[in-house]
Amino acid sequence: MVQTVLKNIGDPMNARDLMPVLTPQAEVALLARALHREGYDDHIAGHIAYLQPDGTFLVNPFEVPWDDVRASDVMRIDADGNVLEGERWSASRALRMHLAFHRRRHDAIVTVHNHPRYATIWSDLKRVPPVYDQTSALIDEDIALYEEWGGLVGEWESAEKVAAAIGDKSAALLAHHGVFVTAKSIDESYIRCMALEWRCRNAWMVEAVGGGVPMPREQTAVLANRINTVGYYSLWEAMVRRELRHDPSVVD
């Protein structure tokens, strides 16, 4: 009996069996809802772009707050930003920042931009926050800093400048603006976005009470490398189940 229990603890089940099969549109809606809980909640601002096998992108509509997005609201655009599906709403011109980035980075599948509460403070300070705890280390040193406000990213020139500044990083703080996060999948994008805001919030609090000792680089690298290679078992699935319990209509 003891051996069986220990095996169950150390041999995780398939977490994807614990939630229904999701359409790509539902994944976008669920990502928006889950990130809203993490502080990605600047009213109707912010956008998610999810590259599809045919080269099109699924995106959240401009007019709908992230905690209200449903699968049926999700739009489809082409690589130039033209709306192909979902004319009920409008696609933000600022999605040009995503499109410019995807042209440079063919490894990117999901890109997220928003103005989360604590990360935006650090972007205003033009500082990348230290890593003070293990959850913050999940994104580790892989953060770019774009040190100027280069104009509205709805213009191609500004969008290209941001995309170039991000380079090969997985995330960026955009001065006086917000964040940009890239990932190879929906679940990885949730982990990186969550860890970035967590890191910014905890670093702000640690420094507000007088400062602390950042984790050594060799320790944070272990955690960041594990996330990049293995992932975070069952985290995204747990967040999906939570959103479905809260509002099953998110997948409608």
Image: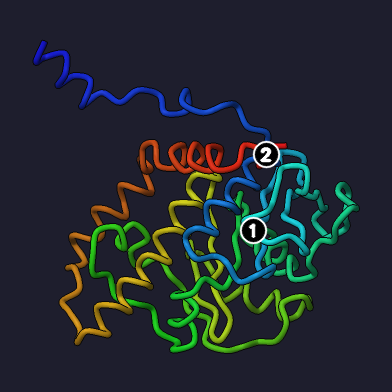
Position of residue 97 relative to residue 121, above or below, is: above
For the residues bearing labels 1 and 2, Cβ distance under 8 angstroms: no
Looking at the rendering, which quadrant does residue 211 occupy?
bottom left
Looking at marks 1 and 2 on the same chain, the residue that comes earlier in the sequence is marked by 1
Residue drawn at x 73%, y 37% is 252
Closest to the camera, between mark 1 and mark 2, is 2
Residue 79 falls left or right of residue 11: right
- The residue wearing badge 1 is 66
- Residue type at numbered disc 2: Ser
Residue drawn at x 78%, y 66% is 92
Label drawn at residue 109: none
Label drawn at residue 249: 2
Residue drawn at x 78%, y 63% is 63
Q: Quick one: 2 or 130, which is closer to the camera?
A: 2
Position of residue 13 relative to residue 61, above or below, is: above
| Extreme residue toward the top, this view | 1
Q: Quick one: 73 or 81, which is closer to the camera?
A: 73
Mark 2, secondary structure of its residue: helix
Counting from the top left corner in percent of width and height, residue 11 is at 25, 23
- Residue type at numbered disc 1: Trp
Mark 1, secondary structure of its residue: helix
Counting from the top left corner in percent of width and height, residue 174 is at 55, 79
Counting from the top left corner in percent of width and height, residue 242 is at 48, 41
Q: Quick one: 218 or 180, which is closer to the camera?
A: 180
- Alpha-carbon distance for marks 1 and 2? 14 Å
Dot 2 crowding, Cα within 10 Å, few <14, some 14–19, many 20+ = some
